[in-house]
Image (spheres, rainbow, N blue to C red):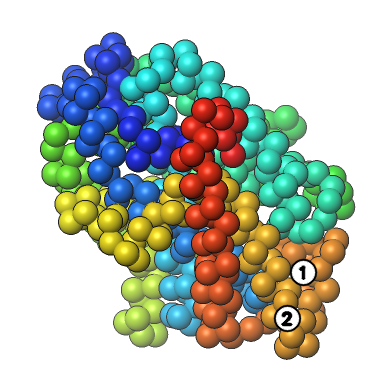
Amino acid sequence: MEFGYPVFTSGVGMASRAGALGSTSFGFDVFDAAEVRAGVQRLMSVDLLRGLVMVVMALDHVRDFMTWRAAPPEFLETHNSLAIFLTRWVTHFCAPTFFFLAGTGAYLMLARRSASEVSRFLWTRGLWLIVLECTIVWFAWTFIPVPIPNIIVIFALGVCMIILAGLVYIPIRWLAPLSLVMIAGHNLFDGIRANTLSTPWREVWMVLHDPGLLKPPPHPFFFVMYPVLPWFAVMSAGFCFGVVITSRQRVKYTAWIGASTTAAFIVLRSSNLYGNGTNPDMFATGPWHHMQSTAMTVASFLNTTKYPPSLDYLLMTIGPALLFLALATRLDWGRGKFSSKLAVFGRVPMFYYICHLFVTHLVALALATAFHEPAKHLGWMGGGFFIGHPSPGFGFNLPMIYFAWILSIVLLYFPCAWYANYKAEHKQNKWLSYM
């Protein structure tokens, strides 16, 4: 179990308590417990999806470590490179998939645990992730051995798990619409800017919705990259999706939800009326517009806001992810030779996440040293790309970045495969569910 949800090959299934949670109120024809345990064991496509987005995530971080640009890829007018933009854009699928499937896994835990047991696991797991973010994960990013709290992805994942620990008691028939309303409506609050508020409301609003520096550097500082809204609603929506994944028609319903979500993105984004934020300090905020070429106009259409995740961003990423899940389940892709290797990463995502930060950081440092690039910021106490100060001449081109990414994935496969086997052989060790 990683990120607070069980591996789908572990034989978990629909809880007999589901009716008490309101999970059958939508009319789904759910499996009984024995059928789900057998069926979920065959659902390798979830590990495949999770593994795929984790591999893609490494590309984003390799790019971060190996380039230094005055403007990020989201600033289309500045760099005007479709290849660089797409290298960044494809990684947008990672975080929403993590949060969504974390909620789904929490629902599936109800097959063998009571709601109170699941709640306790979620809040303790959440606290553990917060500690990891501030210590080991921060060190992997920066090579600075000083614990610093920053609400980046793992910290936010932990906070959302703590919130979900309370939400699991809400019946699905209420939690599902509440989650969707929060996801769809949070952009209505974009006009409230943290810098216009006084303490402590400024800090509260930054944690909730308006990312930025809670406390500026030098050390200790506190940076919010992943505000709570609407990430916790994405996780709770994934929790409600557990009803679908345990139904007899899971492929049909998953495909329908994925297609509807993707279509909603196209319609909403085309209208330019709502859904992509209004904060001028954030990347890719606002409507799309025509650019000097058709390709870059398409890039502008796909250039949605991640910080905080806009409605457009979430529709654009979760919809296709669910379509992939439905197709991979229908065609049983998870059992292929190549896909089974990708699924290894999906079975140990937290272990992979920590390892990939060290590997990509060290690969970038090694290549920079080999090619005589000024890379002091990648070394000991250098700060990495988060708080380091790369020399103006530092950086590699895209072919080199993709080479480093492939090299990193190859290096990561072996420890991840070992750990996946170790976990499978030591299921009695409950502490493994926290790592």
Q: Secondary structure at mark 2?
A: helix
Sequence-wise first label, 2 or 1: 2
- Label 1 neighbour load within 10 Å: few <14, some 14-19, many 20+: many
Q: Which residue is mark 1?
A: 378
Asked whether the viewer can see residue 77, the reply is no
Instruction: Give the CA distance from mark 2 to mark 1.
Output: 9 Å
- Label 2 neighbour load within 10 Å: few <14, some 14-19, many 20+: some
Pinpoint residue 171: horizontal percent, then vertical percent.
Answer: 32, 17
Quadrant of the image occupied by residue 299:
bottom left
Asked whether the viewer can see residue 155, the reply is yes
Count of marks overlaid on the render? 2
Say which of 347 and 293 sits in front.
347
Outermost residue on the front side: it is 425
Q: Would you place residue 359 above or below residue 186 in this image?
A: below
- Label 2 close to label 1 by CB (< 8 Å): yes
Pinpoint residue 155: horizontal percent, then vertical percent.
Answer: 62, 40
Numbered label attached to residue 410: none
Q: What residue do we see at 47% from left, 13% from top?
A: 116
Q: What's the amino acid at mark 2? A: Ala
Pinpoint residue 428: horizontal percent, then vertical percent.
Answer: 52, 28
Relative placement, left or right, of 331 versus 92 is left
Q: Would you place residue 201 above or below residue 411 in this image?
A: above
Q: What residue do we see at 80% from left, 44% from top?
A: 147
Q: Would you place residue 304 above or below residue 346 in this image?
A: below
Q: What residue do we see at 42% from left, 66% from top?
A: 90
Q: Secondary structure at mark 1?
A: helix
Q: Would you place residue 360 above or below residue 372 in this image?
A: above
Q: Which residue is mark 2?
A: 368
